[in-house]
Image (tube, helix red, strand yellow):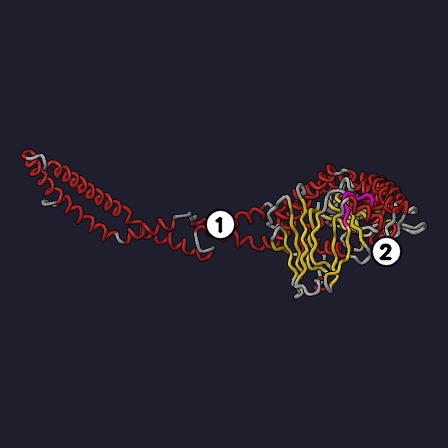
Amino acid sequence: MLHSLEIKDYALIENIHIEFMGGLNIITGETGAGKSILIDAMSLLLGERASTLVVRKEANKSIIEGIFDIKGNNKVAKLLTENDIEVFDDLIIRREISVKGSNRCFINDTPVQLSLIQSVGNQLVDLHGQHDHQSLLKINTHLELIDDFGELDVLKNEYKKHYTRISEITKELFSLRSKEEKLGQDKESYEFQLKEINAVSPRIGEEDELKEQLNLLENSENILSLSNEIYCVAYDNESSAHDQLVEISHLLEKLKNIDLKFGEKLSELLSAIEIIDDIAKFVRTYSDKIDLEAGTLDEMRERLGALSLLKKRYGGSVEKIIEHRTKLMEELEIVVNYDERIKKFEKELESERFAAGQVASDLSEKRKKVAKNIEREVVGALKELGINDATFRVDFKINKLAESAANYVLIGKEKYKFNASGVDEVEFLVSTNLGEDPKPLAKIASGGEISRIMLALKSILAKSDRLPLLIFDEIDTGVSGRIAQKVGNTLKELSKFHQIISITHLPQIAGYADTHFAVEKIKLGSRVVSSIKKLDEHERVHEVAKLLSGEEITEASLKSARELIEFK
C-alpha cells in the first residue's frame, strides 16, 4: 500500500504531504482545485514520461516521492534484487524533473532508469482514469487474471516444466546443428592437433623442473670440480679440516681435565666436526648424482624444445595446452557421437511437445470454464453499476500451425503455436450498448465508462488480483443517484482486498470513505496554489454537504450528509 505521497513544485502544487491509510481513501474538491494534478503526479511517480512544463513557475525542479509498504511483495523484491537495490519493508520511489530538462529517478535513494520505475510501478499500482497506466487494458494481463481467478497454478506449473524443457532441448539441438558443418571441416585439424599434443603429453609444472635440472647438468663440470675440492679440503686431504678439528678436540679434552671451563668449547668443536662431516657427505652425494644424470642432457633439451613449440601453437603456457587438448577431445566426441546425440534430443523433444500439448489442452479447457463464470459475473456487476445492456466476452484464440512448422506443441496429431503461458491467446471484449458488437477494452472511448468496467472487473477479480493499490480517477463520470451509491458500495467492498484511492465529485461515493481528503485552491500573495487536507469527522460532514448543495451549506444538506456517511 501507499503510506505517503509528497509533491513539491509541481504545477499548482507548492508543497503537499499526504499520509494515506488502508481501505477506501476518497479525494474531493471543486473543479480545477487540483485533484487531477495529484493523479498526474502519481502517474509520473509510476513511470510516465515527464515534461518540463510541469515544474511550478519560479521553481527549478519538481519532486514527487512516494513511500510504499512492499512487505510480502515478492515480485517487487525480485525486481529490486535483480537490479542490486537493497530490499526493505518500505520502498521509496522519487522522481525529479528539472526545468533544464534533466529527469532523475531513484528507488531507495539509488539512481535508476525510468524503465525500472515503470516495472516496479506495474507491480504496485493500478491506476484507472484518463491515463495509460491501466493493467486491464493490457492484453497480456488478461490470461494471467483468468488463471489467478481460476486458481490454476498447479496446472500452469506443470505446463511450464514442459515448456522450459522444450526450450532447453531446442537450444541444445540448435547448438549441435550449427556446429555440424564446422566440426566436419575441422575434424582432421583437431585430430592432428590432438595427436601432436599427446605425442608430448605435457604436464603442469614439468617445464620449471626441466629448466632447473638442465641448469644443473649444463654446469655439471664446474659443480663436480668444486664439490670434489670441498670434499678434499673438508675431509679427504691429509691435513683436512676434519682431521685438524679432531686434533684440536684431543687438545681441548686434555685442557678440560685441568679446567672444566674448556668443556663448553669442546662441545662446540664436536658440533663443528659434525657439520664439516655433513657438508662433505652432501657434496659427495650431490656430485655422484650429477655424474649419473649427465647423459640425459640432450633428452632434456629436446623435451623443452617440444614444449616450447606446443606453447607457441596452443596458448603460451602448458596450462593452456592442456585446456586446448580437453576442448579438442570434447569437440571430437561431439563429432563422433553427433548423430546419436541428435536422435536422442529429437526423440525427447517430440515427447515433450506431446506432453506440453496435453497439459496446454487441459489448461485451455479449464480457462474457458473459468472465463464463462467471469463473463456472467462481470455482466451482473456492470448492471449494478448502471450499465444495463452490457455484453462481456473473453475471446480465446488457439493458432494451428502448418505441417512444416518447426516450433510447436502437439495436441493429438496437430501442431499448435505456444508460449510460456500455453496455447491460448486471450482478450477481454465488451459492449456497453444494446446491439453493439463487443470490442477490446482499449477501444472503449468514455473514461468514466472504462473506469466502471474496470471497477466491475476488479470487484470480480479482487481476491486473485495481487496489485496492492488501485486508483480511480473520476470513476463516477456520467452516474448519479442510486448508481452512484452502487459505485460507492462496490469501491467499499473492493477496499477489503486493496487500498483504494478514488477521486469523486459525488456525495454518495464520498460517504463511503474510510479516509477523506479535500483539495482546494488557496491564494498566497499573488499566486494561487493547490493544497490538500485530511478531514476529521466534522469537516467530512461539511465537505459531503457541500457536494450535495454547493457552497451554501444548509441544515438539510448537513442532515443528508450525516445520513450518507452513516449509511455506509
Q: Nearer the viewer, residue 371 or 131?
A: 131
Q: In which image quadrant can residue 280 be found?
A: top left
Q: Is residue 473 magenta?
A: no
Label 1 with label 2: CB-CB less than 8 Å: no
| Spot occupied by residue 3 in the image (x, y as percentages of width and height) | 69, 46
Out of 125 and 557, give the one closest to the viewer. 557
Give the mark, 1 or 2, whose residue is nearer the N terminus: 1
Q: Can residue 401 be seen by looking at this rendering?
A: no
Looking at the rendered structure, which numbered label has been put on residue 523?
A: none
Residue 562 falls in image quadrant? top right
Report the quarter where the C terminus lies.
Answer: top right
Say if residue 536 shows up in the picture.
Answer: yes
The magenta stretch is: 511-517
Name, please, the residue furthest toward the right: 435
Looking at the rendered structure, the kind of residue marked 1 is Glu
Q: Is residue 526 above or below residue 94?
A: below
Mark 1 sits on what residue? 323
What residue lies at 82% left-to-right and 55% top-to-bottom?
30
Cα–Cα span, label 1 and label 2: 66 Å
x and y, in percent, of residue 216 in the image: 28, 51
